[in-house]
Structure formats: C-alpha cells, structure tokens
C-alpha cells in the first residue's frame, strides 16, 4: 500500500503547498518509506511477549479519619485570629 505522486500533489494543493517535480518525487518516496515502516510495525506479533511493566499503585486509599479539633490545632500557635493561624502578608499591593 503506497502513495502515488498524484495523491501527494493533491494533498499539497489542499495544504496550499507548491512543490517542483523533483521535490514531489522525493516527498512521495519519503511518505512511502513511512507507510512501509508502519506496515512492518503493524505486522509484529506482540501477543507472545510477557508484560514487563509490573507497576502497581502504592498509594494508600484516601480515607478520612478523626484529626485535631480546631482548639488542638491552634494550641501551639502564638499568633491566632478567630479560628485561624495568622501569618505575615505575602502578597504586595
């Protein structure tokens, strides 16, 4: 299954590209090489190979659990405002 120069010329016209006869021949040859290589790759039987990528998910499940109360979380902070820890301003106006 190859590509003809006529097909490449039509494709070039659709893409608004202009090629000389020599360039058209070179491009057609290159496209045909790609098609040939693709056909080779598609012909490879990969069902017989053993899967070598044996990665597994090592992350733990995201399970919610009881944590600190607001008072316990703020207990070690010296700079509190309402139910939050106050920090210096980072953004400049």
Image: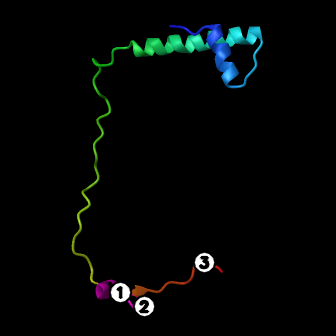
Residue placed under numbered mark 1 in the picture: 74
Front residue (pair 21, 52): 21
Asked if residue 34 is among those painted magenta in the image, a careful observer would answer no
Q: Specify the label residue 91 is tagged with.
A: 3
Extreme residue toward the right, this view: 20
Q: Position of residue 59 (x, y in %)?
A: 29, 53
Q: Position of residue 32 (x, y in %)?
A: 57, 10
Which portion, as a residue range, is magenta?
70-83
Quarter-of-image position of residue 67: bottom left
Q: Secondary structure at mark 3?
A: loop
Q: Secondary structure at mark 2?
A: strand
C-alpha distance separating marks 2 and 3:
19 Å
Figure check: 49 above or below 70? above
- Image depth: mark 2 or mark 3 in front: 3
Residue placed under numbered mark 2 in the picture: 80
Quarter-of-image position of residue 5: top right
Residue at the (39%, 12%) spot, across then down = 43
C-alpha distance separating marks 1 and 2:
7 Å
- Which quadrant of the figure contains the C terminus? bottom right
Return the disc, 2 or 3, that comes first in the chain's sequence: 2
């Amino acid at each position: 299954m190859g590509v003809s120069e006529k097909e490449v010329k039509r494709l070039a016209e659709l893409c608004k590209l202009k090629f000389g006869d020599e360039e058209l021949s070179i491009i057609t040859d290159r496209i045909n090489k790609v098609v040939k290589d693709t056909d080779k790759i598609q012909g490879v039987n990969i069902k017989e190979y053993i899967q070598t990528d044996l990665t597994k998910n090592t992350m733990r499940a995201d399970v919610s659990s009881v944590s600190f109360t607001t008072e316990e979380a703020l207990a070690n902070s010296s700079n509190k405002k309402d139910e939050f820890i106050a920090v210096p301003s980072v953004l400049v106006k």
